[in-house]
């Protein structure tokens, strides 16, 4: 499966707690391929409740990670498929980036 096929499969979904879910939002942001200027997918504009849930899940995961020894942390990376590991990190960071942008927008609207 190509990266574009995989991206198309997860388009319009949000990544939470290790799984992709359909967003509650009906609004989305188009993802444009800069080389062709074609739309290759969509990112949902997440709701405040979804953002709060993702932040809560991330906080719990961070607490669990902090409880592991440095040796356990280093060995966990060796168990994972490096390509899958990097792909999931990219998706996680990108998702958090989008969530934080939306969350900042929600906070500003209240000011």
Image (cartoon, rainbow, N blue to C red):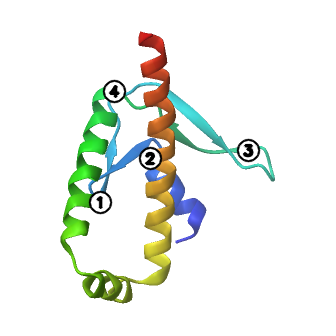
Question: How many residues crowd mark 1 within 10 Å: few (<14), some (14–19), many (20+)?
Answer: few
Q: Earlier in the sequence, mark 1 or mark 2?
A: 1
Eye-nearest disc, 1 or 2:
2
Task: Say which of 29 and 63 sits in front.
Answer: 63
Residue position marked by numbered label 4 in the rendering: 48
Marks 2 and 3 sit apart, C-alpha to C-alpha, by 24 Å
Q: Residue at x 33, y 41 (%)?
A: 22
Residue position marked by numbered label 3 in the rendering: 38
Marks 4 and 1 sit apart, C-alpha to C-alpha, by 20 Å
Q: Secondary structure at mark 4?
A: helix
Eye-nearest disc, 2 or 3:
2
Task: Say which of 19 and 54 sits in front.
Answer: 54
Marks 4 and 2 sit apart, C-alpha to C-alpha, by 13 Å
Q: Position of residue 97 (x, y in %)?
A: 51, 44
Eye-nearest disc, 4 or 1:
4
Q: Secondary structure at mark 3?
A: loop
Question: How many residues crowd mark 2 within 10 Å: few (<14), some (14–19), many (20+)?
Answer: some
Q: Secondary structure at mark 2?
A: helix
- Could you say which quadrant of the image residue 47 lies in? top left
Residue position marked by numbered label 2 in the rendering: 96
Q: Position of residue 51 (x, y in %)?
A: 34, 35
Q: Earlier in the sequence, mark 4 or mark 3?
A: 3
Q: CB under 8 Å between callouts 4 and 1?
A: no
Q: Position of residue 34 (x, y in %)?
A: 77, 49
Q: Residue at x 72, y 49 (%)?
A: 33
For residue 18, the mark is 1
Q: Residue at x 49, y 23 (%)?
A: 105
């Amino acid at each position: 499966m190509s990266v574009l096929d995989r991206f198309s499969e997860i388009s319009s979904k949000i990544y939470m707690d290790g799984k992709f879910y359909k967003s509650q939002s009906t609004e989305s942001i188009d993802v444009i391929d800069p080389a062709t200027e074609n739309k290759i997918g969509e990112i949902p504009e997440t709701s405040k409740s979804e953002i709060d849930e993702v932040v809560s899940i991330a906080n719990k995961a961070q607490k669990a990670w902090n409880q592991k020894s440095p040796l356990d942390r280093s060995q966990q990376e060796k168990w994972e498929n490096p390509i899958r590991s990097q792909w999931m990190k990219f998706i996680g960071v990108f998702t958090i980036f989008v969530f934080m942008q939306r969350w900042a927008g929600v906070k500003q609207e209240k000011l």
